[in-house]
């Protein structure tokens, strides 16, 4: 973040891209799929690094078509870090927080979810009357599974492990975060 002028999340990427003055070139890292989505939605030219979230990138259009055929009554909601050809098949494109809100507010009863399957537990608790179908059972992020409640408890009780960031890096990273937070949300 310290090397960025501004940062974003999947929830605010379009607003952040639109906030950049038109005469400035936008180079986005690390996710090419999110950058392509933001470019399409914002109408701005976005250059991007050829990186991706392997969990979202591995979801194929063929897999989505298979699940949609098996559950024609379900709406397909995908995360914007999925490949463009997957996003073309969606009923809705939502960030993780956007999915939580959309499913809760929707009158629809069945949803196919194109994102990390860990969200299914949270969605099921909040929406026990709805049918939640993973687009692919293999959409599991091992990095997201590294930290559990015992780790969080230990960190809160002992304030360990402690991470130290150089002051110059902290200041630059905070500038990028502050710029993002200053962008109006829709």
Image (cartoon, rainbow, N blue to C red):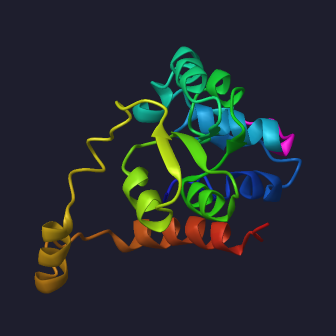
Q: Nearer the viewer, residue 119 or 17?
A: 119
Q: Is residue 124 left or right of residue 75?
A: left
Image point (56%, 60%), residue name: 100
Across and down, in percent, residue 98 comes to 62, 58
Q: Nearer the viewer, residue 180 or 134?
A: 134
Q: Which residues are magenta?
A: 42-46
145 versus 63 height, above or below = below
116 versus 184 height, above or below = above
Across and down, in percent, residue 21 comes to 85, 55
Across and down, in percent, residue 17 comes to 75, 51
Q: Is residue 144 left or right of residue 44?
A: left
In the rendered structure, does residue 170 fall within the stretch colored magenta? no
Q: Nearer the viewer, residue 105 or 110?
A: 110
Q: How many marks?
A: 0
Image point (48%, 73%), residue name: 171
What is the quadrant of the C terminus in the image?
Answer: bottom right
In the rendered structure, does residue 45 fall within the stretch colored magenta? yes
Residue 67 visible in image: yes
Name the residue furthest top.
62
Image point (66%, 38%), residue name: 35
Name the residue furthest bottom.
157
Residue 7 visible in image: no
Q: Quadrant of residue 80?
A: top right
Q: Main secondary structure of the magenta part?
A: loop
């Amino acid at each position: 973040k310290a090397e960025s002028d501004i940062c974003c999340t999947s929830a605010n990427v379009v607003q952040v891209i639109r906030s950049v003055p038109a005469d400035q070139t936008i180079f986005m890292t690390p996710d090419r799929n999110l950058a392509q989505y933001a470019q399409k939605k914002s109408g701005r030219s976005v250059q991007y690094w050829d990186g991706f979230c392997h969990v979202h990138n591995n979801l194929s259009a063929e897999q989505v078509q298979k699940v949609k055929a098996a559950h024609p009554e379900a709406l397909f909601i995908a995360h914007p870090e999925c490949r463009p050809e997957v996003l073309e098949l969606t009923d809705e494109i939502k960030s993780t927080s956007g999915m939580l809100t959309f499913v809760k507010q929707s009158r629809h009863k069945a949803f196919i979810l194109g994102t990390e399957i860990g969200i299914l537990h949270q969605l099921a608790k909040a929406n026990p009357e709805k049918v939640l179908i993973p687009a692919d059972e293999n959409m599991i992020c091992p990095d997201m599974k590294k930290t559990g409640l015992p780790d969080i408890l230990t960190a809160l009780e002992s304030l360990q492990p402690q991470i130290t960031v150089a002051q110059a890096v902290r200041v630059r990273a905070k500038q990028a975060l502050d710029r993002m937070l200053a962008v109006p949300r829709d």
